Image (tube, helix red, strand yellow):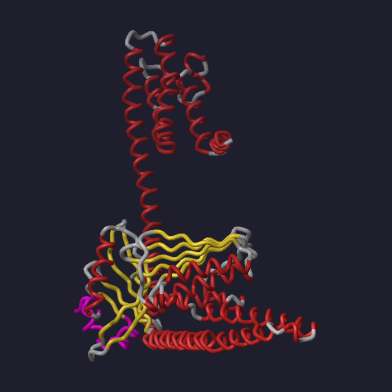
């Protein structure tokens, strides 16, 4: 299709028809004596009366050759040279009576073709230069437009950089500060000029310098290090401020060229969070103390009173032969109810605070917990122990027991599980507790904090207890595949 279009365009070009007309006209003049039409050509007798005067007409053929070279460059020069060769050869071979006619014709064609091709090449060069100038002009215009856009973009970036509510600094790979916005100046108390003469490590508290060096080495090795972290910055007046840093590497050609750091002041948030954690820790501790007190009272007083009452009732039934049958039957029923109530009080006392945990440690308490779950709920629950068993601090043992208790309670009350496997693993540096069930499971939110809106407060309680001992809590659950709760804590 493109060739057909090119052919149509060529045929519509008036230069093609002008070259063809001139060539045909000069060919007729060149062969006029042979065709016997000298009389119709003006001054024909004059031109053809002398020997070799037809060579003047042959020389005129250089006109269409040069014309073609000017219009169609090298291709036109070559094609027209070939056409003129075809025009002059028949006369030199067949018509001319002179023995050197062929040599003369070839010399003419060679010289004319050489001049024509050189002209065509020059035209090619000029056309390429013209195109290059056009491209250069376009590129220059694009460059000017790009420069204007870049300048406008830089101005917008500068405005955004300066007006940003969060503190921003840009440093080179060595940590030397290059740029800082007004929010950073307000945060640390140094002026922009002072900051540009400082290294970012001079703003960090002593304990954070090693972390900053490690992060910079990761960037220099070309590894991804975009991250958020909390650090302590030193203000000019010597006070500390806690900030959340969002650090991003700026690269060019896969090379680190700068580091952009966005700092958000979280001092108040951190203090509120610390106060909240302290408050939760105190509440949890007070709750455990209250549970311990209630469990002790239930065991030492209520259970003992119920046991004494059961003994009295049993003593009365010994005189059954002196009492009416209905009274004896009623007393026996009352004795059974009292014993059942006493068992319930003891079980409730153990759930509040098992004495095994305080006297024998975590593992016996977990064994009792899994056994009690199997006996009272019909769930196949068992405990696996990995590593060498050892006692832990009272606080860690209590937290791990409460998390296991909550996980087993959820399996019994909500998951419809038939099997629960608890496993505790001891190593030299840490201990890991994991409770898995084969229940119906549930869909976990992306953030555990969203469980509050779903009324799943038990898991949030586990999470808060894990924070008290600096433990790492993990909850995994899939629909119809059960739930796994695990906590790992350094010892």
Tell me the quarter of the image containing the C terminus: bottom left
Kindly indicate the quadrant of the structure image that contains residue 82. top left
Q: Is residue 154 above or below residue 143?
A: below
> Residue 214, how many percent across, how many down?
25, 66
Q: Which residues are magenta?
A: 181-204
> Residue 217, how many percent across, how many down?
25, 63
Residue 322 as seen in the image, left or right of residue 406: right
Residue occupying the point 33% across, 83% down: 242
> Residue 99, how many percent across, how many down?
33, 8
Magenta region includes residue 196: yes
Residue occupying the point 44% across, 72% down: 400
Residue occupying the point 52% across, 84% down: 299
Q: Is residue 416 visible?
A: yes
Residue 107 as seen in the image, left or right of residue 306: left
Q: Nearer the viewer, residue 258 or 324?
A: 324
Q: Nearer the viewer, residue 58 or 293?
A: 293
Magenta region includes residue 471: no
Kindly indicate the quadrant of the structure image that contains residue 5. top right
Tell me the quarter of the image containing the N terminus: top right
Q: Is residue 478 visible?
A: no
Q: Is residue 106 above or below residue 65?
A: above
């Amino acid at each position: 299709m493109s060739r057909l279009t090119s052919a149509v365009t060529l045929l519509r070009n008036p230069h093609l028809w002008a070259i063809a007309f001139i060539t045909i006209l000069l060919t007729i003049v060149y062969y006029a004596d042979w065709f016997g039409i000298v009389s119709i050509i003006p001054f024909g007798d004059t031109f053809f009366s002398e020997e070799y005067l037809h060579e003047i007409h042959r020389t005129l053929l250089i006109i269409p050759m040069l014309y073609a070279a000017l219009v169609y460059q090298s291709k036109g020069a070559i094609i027209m040279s070939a056409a003129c060769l075809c025009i002059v050869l028949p006369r030199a071979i067949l018509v001319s009576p002179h023995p050197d006619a062929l040599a003369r014709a070839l010399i003419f064609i060679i010289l004319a073709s050489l001049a024509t091709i050189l002209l065509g090449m020059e035209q090619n060069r000029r056309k390429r230069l013209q195109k290059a100038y056009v491209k250069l002009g376009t590129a220059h215009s694009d460059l000017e437009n790009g420069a204007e856009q870049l300048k406008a973009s830089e101005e917008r970036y500068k405005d955004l950089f300066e007006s940003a509510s969060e503190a921003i600094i840009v440093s080179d790979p060595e940590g030397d500060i290059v740029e800082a916005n007004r929010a950073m100046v307000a945060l640390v108390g140094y002026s922009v000029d002072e900051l540009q003469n400082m290294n970012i490590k001079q703003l960090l508290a002593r304990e954070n310098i090693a972390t900053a060096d490690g992060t910079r080495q990761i960037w220099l090795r070309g590894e991804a290090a975009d991250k958020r972290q909390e650090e302590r910055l030193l203000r000019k007046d010597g006070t500390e401020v806690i900030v959340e840093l969002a650090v991003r590497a700026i690269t060019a050609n896969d090379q680190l060229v700068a580091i952009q750091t966005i700092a958000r002041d979280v001092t108040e948030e951190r203090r509120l969070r610390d106060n909240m954690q302290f408050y939760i820790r105190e509440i949890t501790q007070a709750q455990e103390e209250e549970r311990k007190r209630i469990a002790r009272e239930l065991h030492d007083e209520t259970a003992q009173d119920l046991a004494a009452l059961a003994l009295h009732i049993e003593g009365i039934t010994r005189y059954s032969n002196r009492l009416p049958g209905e009274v004896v039957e009623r007393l026996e029923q009352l004795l059974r109810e009292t014993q059942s109530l006493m068992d319930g009080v003891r079980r409730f006392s153990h759930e509040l605070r098992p004495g095994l945990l305080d006297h024998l440690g975590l593992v016996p308490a977990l064994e009792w917990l899994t056994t009690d779950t199997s006996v009272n709920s019909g769930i196949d629950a068992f405990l696996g122990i990995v590593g060498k068993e050892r006692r832990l601090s009272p606080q860690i043992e209590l937290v791990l027991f409460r998390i296991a208790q909550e996980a087993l309670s959820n399996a019994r009350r909500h998951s419809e599980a038939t099997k629960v496997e608890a496993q505790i693993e001891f190593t030299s540096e840490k201990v890991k507790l994991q409770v898995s069930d084969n229940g119906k499971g549930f869909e976990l939110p992306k953030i555990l904090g969203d469980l509050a809106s779903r009324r799943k407060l038990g898991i949030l309680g586990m999470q808060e207890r894990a924070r008290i001992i600096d433990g790492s809590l993990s909850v995994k659950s899939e629909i119809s595949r059960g739930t796994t709760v695990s906590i790992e804590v350094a010892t």
